Amino acid sequence: MPKNAFMSVISLEEKKGSVEFQVLSFTYKIRRLSSHLELHKKDYSSQRGLRKILGKRQRLLAFFSKKNRVRYKELISQLNIREIKKR
């Protein structure tokens, strides 16, 4: 999925440092790495990078769900990602 398709999720006036933009860029990287790993199953350094990015996105989503629940729900529905698990 091209990066430009995700850009419609976030309005233009938002900054690149916003939580939404960071989650968006991590989601793009995750999808790109996942497709790479389907071809290269033994690329362990990419697997490690994918796990690190997944953890970063998970922490950001946990923070964002506490900060603004309505925008969090909109973001995960538009990006087609699952809700974070509660501990």
Image (cartoon, grey):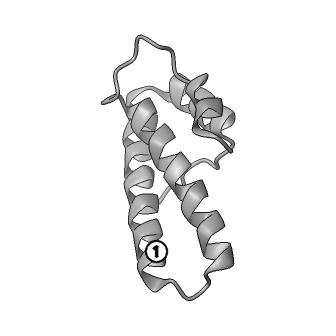
The quarter holding residue 31 reads bottom right
In the depicted structure, whether residue 16 falls above or below residue 22: above
In the depicted structure, whether residue 13 falls above or below residue 48: above
Query: Looking at the picture, how far across and down is residue 75, in whole percent?
Result: 58, 31
In the depicted structure, whether residue 71 falls above or below residue 23: above
In the depicted structure, whether residue 45 falls above or below residue 8: below
In the foreground, 31 or 58: 31
The quarter holding residue 3 reads top right
Query: Looking at the picture, how far across and down is residue 53, in whole percent?
Result: 41, 59
Q: Residue at x 44, y 53 (%)?
A: 58
Instruction: Report whether residue 73 is seen.
Output: no
Q: Which residue lies furthest to the bottom in this view?
A: 42
Query: Looking at the picture, how far across and down is residue 64, in whole percent?
Result: 41, 35
Query: Looking at the picture, how far across and down is residue 40, in whole percent?
Result: 61, 81
Q: Residue at x 68, y 45 (%)?
A: 1
In the foreground, 68 or 2: 2
Q: How many labels does the image show?
A: 1
> What amino acid type is highlighted by mark number 1?
Ser
- Residue placed under numbered mark 1 in the picture: 46
Task: Give left or right: position of 77 versus 18.
Answer: right
Query: Mark 1: which secondary structure?
Result: helix
